[in-house]
Amino acid sequence: MTKILIIEDDLVIASALKNLLNDNNYEGVILENFSNSLEEILKENPSLILLDINIPYINGKTLLKNLRAKSNIPVIMVTSKNSEVDEALSITYGADDYITKPYNPNILLLRIGAVLKRYNNNEDTITYKDLIINIPKGTIKRDIKEITLTKNEMIIFNYLVNHQNRIVTRDELMTTLWNNDEFINDNALTVNISRLRIKLKEIGLPNSIETRKNLGYILL
């Protein structure tokens, strides 16, 4: 069942949303820990997020911006402000759609369906050994175990997979990250490679990325 995470601090509204989703063949889940919102989102790994713009501890737009640095999970911003500025900022920060309170439940369901359909139609998966790499979702999966990669980790891993069994230089990787609007320096690249190796080991594929001294990296 498609899991939709509700990030809304008004419990009455959140409960109504959950009931609406559950009644329409979705699994509605309410975020309870707002102090660690980003970590909770990544742990839940939902198919879509309904994100209120005014939440405790962190502004919804800021949370969305932080989320986009780590994941491409579809997000619909839900706001009580009928403001073109909020709408524009939501889209700028990476929202897939937005809806203003009070909203028509049927319209919300149509928007959810449209975003999920668009996301699934654009879904692009590739394989490496027995690993399934879901690029838009930012995940790698082996059997039933699934791990989330950051945006930079996925860009690096995708490039290595597409150039498997040949040496990829550090300059190539840094250029690829730059072309994806990601500023990264030499030290940051080393950190991202190290974290990627840890996640590959965690999923059961250790020693997949080999360093070739003064040359670069090769995915075996």
Image (spheres, rainbow, N blue to C red):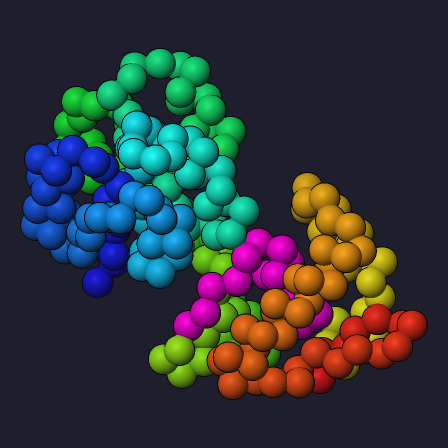
Vertical position of residue 211 compared to residue 31: above or below: below
Q: Quadrant of residue 95?
A: top left
Q: Quadrant of the N terminus?
A: bottom left
Residue 123 visible, this orientation? no
Place of residue 206 in the rendered image (x, y in percent of width and height, measured from the top left): 60, 85
Q: Residue at x 18, y 56 (%)?
A: 27
Place of residue 89 in the rendered image (x, y in percent of width and height, measured from the top left): 47, 24
Relative horizontal placement of residue 29, taking residue 210 as reference (left or right): left
Q: Quadrant of residue 174?
A: bottom right
Q: Quadrant of the C terminus?
A: bottom right
Residue 175 visible, this orientation? yes
Q: Nearer the viewer, residue 69 or 167?
A: 69
Relative horizontal placement of residue 211, taking residue 202 as reference (left or right): right
Place of residue 55 in the rendered image (x, y in percent of width and height, measured from the top left): 29, 33
Q: Main secondary structure of the magenta part?
A: helix
How many numbered markers are drawn? 0
Vertical position of residue 150 compared to residue 103: above or below: below
Relative horizontal placement of residue 19, taking residue 93 as reference (left or right): left
The span picked out in magenta is: 146-162
Q: Residue at x 49, y 74 (%)?
A: 132
Indicate yes or no whether the magenta region holds residue 157. Answer: yes
Q: Residue at x 10, y 42 (%)?
A: 15
Indicate yes or no whether the magenta region holds residue 48. Answer: no
Q: Residue at x 80, y 56 (%)?
A: 186
Place of residue 195 in the rendered image (x, y in percent of width and height, measured from the top left): 61, 67
Relative horizontal placement of residue 29, taking residue 49 as reference (left or right): left
Vertical position of residue 176 compared to residue 79: above or below: below
